[in-house]
Amino acid sequence: MSFVGCLLMVSGWLIAIAALLLLVGSGQRLAFVMAGLLVESIGLVLVAQSYRALQKAQG
Amino acid sequence: MSLLNVAVCLVCIFLVPLSAAGLALIYQGLGRSRSAAHAMLATLCALGVAAIVFVAIGFSWAGYPGGAAHAFHTGGVRWDWLGADPFLAHGVRSGLLKGPYAALVLCLQIFAVGVAVLIPVSSGNDRWRLLPICCSSALLAGLLYPLFSHWVWGGGWLAQMGSSFGIPAFSDAGGAGVVQVVGGFAALSVAWVLGPRQGKYSEGVATAIPGHNIVLVLFGCLLGLVGWIGLDSATSMLFYGATVDLLPMVAINAMLSAAAGCLAAVFTTHLRYRKPDASLSANGWIAGLVAGSAGCGRVSPGVAILIGLVAGGLVTFLVETLELKLLVDDPGGAISVHAGAGLWGLIALGLFGPVQGASRMGLILAQLVGVATLLGVMFPLIHAGNLLLNRILPYRVDSDGDWQGMDIRELGAGAYPEFVMHADEFAPR
């Protein structure tokens, strides 16, 4: 789960960079960069959950 | 740079080690007394390793505006991704005849990278061994910090977004992203790799392990203020073309955001716990400094107060969330203070910073791209590096050392041998 979370974080960054490269309008770019940040946040939450689950399992 | 600007910049750079001294006192005071000497020695070792490794290889990759760089072209855009100066700062010495700029940047960066490597030492307090601390500091100072530093301060792709994508460059005048968020992410990674201190959680419920010397913590906040003013001023002059005229504004805003952060934390903790919490209030002070450093002299005093207020409130919330909900044991609150408040400061600069010919949306977009890069590139790299190092050289002290304290375990003597005795050191386990 931790690995998947990190992959999601990288994917979110790629979405943000793709928005800069492929889109022209500021509004569209902002929307896609925010979508990328959302994907990164989900990835961070996944990594956090995996470590939380590990701590709980270890008591 | 004029002679006056060079002289003032040098004075500001010489103040920067005070921010490291302040942070070291804060982290040592918020840890347990049985690991106090170890925490201070770890600070010195981390600073030493960072300085040597950064001069040896890091500065070559971090570079400076106008210096040599590696770049590639894709999609019609030039991606300047890494500095290409000679190793061991050879270019700086030979370039002194042309002017002191590169030498000033190197001088500042040695101290700035020192601040960055100190931050994870805090989250690993009481259980992180000395040798892995040195190795992790070397990784951060030699590879990871220079990478992001080049992108923002070395004329890299984040600094060139104006010519590449037609939006303003990502802006970080005082190092909220380059120094604080990078260090804060390293702190988060280290806390996850190490796991919590023994006795911190019992069946998922957190136990309070209070810091052993709150006076040192609060004194560290005052030292930190002076260091931060130096750091904000020097980076603004070297990387954003600020002149001496702007420096009073940098100092005013640093003081205001620190004050607002501290008062917000005092107020929030008073509301929640009926009495102000000294350690969280100290965290609020530093969080204000961290968040305010993104814009430093370029925002109005009112905005600096607002940024500090939000940072102070945010940090109390984050400390509690990390400790109670996510089971992350961070003795000094470094993750919340440096990563949390740093990210807020970068976003706040987009929301309230001066537009200077660009659109507000463009400015917000530029700051968000920087934040996305920190989250999507720097955090995975830092975490992968720490996981790999932990495989080669286990970070955590063994369980006996955890109870004994790092002073006895690794140094053979305590910080306060005549005054402190721990009953649980002798209790059967």
Image: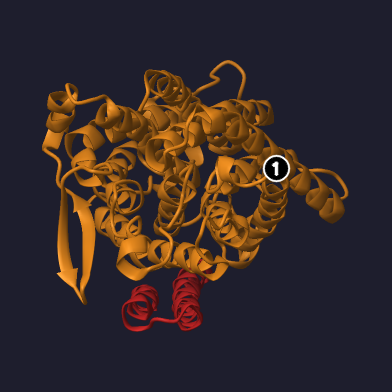
Chain colours: A red, B orange
Q: Which is nearer the eye, B54 or B417? A: B54
In the picture shown, does residue A22 fall above or below B281? below
Q: Which is nearer the eye, B153 or B429? A: B153
Q: Which is nearer the eye, B154 or B49? A: B154
Name the residue that disc number 1 marks.
B301
Q: Mark 1 lies on which chain?
A: B
Residue B211 visible, this orientation = no
Q: Which residue lies furthest to the top in this view?
A: B418
Residue B89, horizontal then vertical, whole percent: 17, 31
Quarter of the picture containing the N terminus of chain B is: top left
In the image, what residue type sits under mark 1? Pro
| Residue occupying the point 20% across, 42% down | B67
Position of B388 with respect to B174 (left or right) is left
Few, some or many C-alpha atoms within 10 Å of disc 1 (few <14, some 14-19, many ≥20)?
Answer: some
Position of A55 with respect to B193 (left or right) is right
Position of B428 with respect to A21 (left or right) is right
In the picture shown, does residue B11 fall above or below B361? above
| Residue occupying the point 46% across, 68% down | A51
Residue B138, located in which quarter of the rendered image? top left
Residue B75, located in which quarter of the rendered image? bottom left
Residue B409, horizontal then vertical, whole percent: 40, 33
Instruction: Tell me the element at label 1.
Output: helix
| Residue occupying the point 49% across, 48% down | B176
| Residue occupying the point 43% across, 37% down | B235
Residue B278 visible, this orientation = yes
Residue B423, horizontal then vertical, whole percent: 62, 34
In the picture shown, does residue B357 fall above or below B142? below
Residue B365, horizontal then vertical, whole percent: 48, 69
